Amino acid sequence: QKEVEQDPGPLSVPEGAIVSLNCTYSNSAFQYFMWYRQYSRKGPELLMYTYSSGNKEDGRFTAQVDKSSKYISLFIRDSQPSDSATYLCATPHIQGAQKLVFGQGTRLTINP
Amino acid sequence: DAGITQSPRYKITETGRQVTLMCHQTWSHSYMFWYRQDLGHGLRLIYYSAAADITDKGEVPDGYVVSRSKTENFPLTLESATRSQTSVYFCASSERQGMNQPQHFGDGTRLSIL
């Protein structure tokens, strides 16, 4: 079992829709969770991170962690075509905080 | 420009050849990383370095060699390339240790091994 699982999609939604991207993780010791965004033929860039449980909001983006079910989510409100990218969840490995464990990534397309 | 740059952006080589991928960062970040990205596997850590002359294995180190003689450079060498090493390789850096420290990625090297 992978430590972080993510549905690779692809996911295609119309402009303006609310998008929900999800990951599950296996180790309850994981506490920090990150979302990276990767445009085509580019490297990933950090979008936002959360610690432990609860929600964190940044503009149109909300990251949510449910530790009881080991589930993390990224919601995008009022989605735009510029949000079309691959979204990767990640968490620092418990054996070394600098070693990130990534999900497979979900490819998202926002259709105008 | 400041940032992290990888070279070459594209490389085609043959099995058994040695190939070196270059990574250079201008931030003087302590930590540097090499990942490979494959369909179905996402990003997997190959090697990382906490400082000059300090390197350690990641999840998939076999067949790769790294060195870090200077803080700003972190080359990755495939000593005898195999087809299974065809992938997109990303270099990343982060300023210091800490769970909330972001990693900054280069734009990748697409490596094809025939």
Image (spheres, coloured by chain):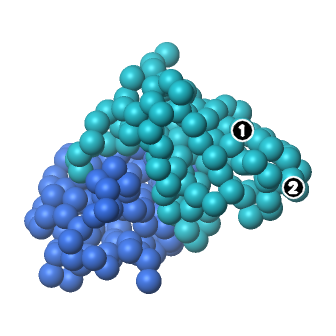
Chain colours: A blue, B cyan
Instruction: Pinpoint residue A107: horizontal percent, then vertical percent.
Output: 50, 62
Instruction: Pinpoint residue A99: horizontal percent, then vertical percent.
Output: 38, 54
Seen from the viewer's position, the closer of residues A57 and A81 is A57
- Secondary structure of residue under mark 2: loop
Is the N terminus of chain A in the top left, top right, bottom left or bottom right quadrant?
A: bottom left
Instruction: Pinpoint residue A22: horizontal percent, then vertical percent.
Output: 34, 71
Can you identify the residue that label 2 sits on?
B15
Seen from the viewer's position, the closer of residues B112 and B65 is B65
CB atoms of marks 1 and 2 within 8 Å:
no
The chain identifier of the residue carrying mark 2 reads B
Nearest to N terminus: mark 1 or mark 2: 2
Image quadrant in which you'd find residue A5:
bottom left
Q: Which mark is residue A45?
A: none
Pointer 1 local density, CA inside 10 Å: few below 14, some 14–19, many at least 20: some
Q: Residue at x 34, y 50 (%)?
A: A98
Task: Name the outermost residue toward the left.
Answer: A54
Can you identify the residue that label 1 sits on?
B20
Q: Is residue B83 left or right of residue B29?
A: right
Q: Is residue A54 above or below residue A50?
A: below
- Secondary structure of residue under mark 1: strand
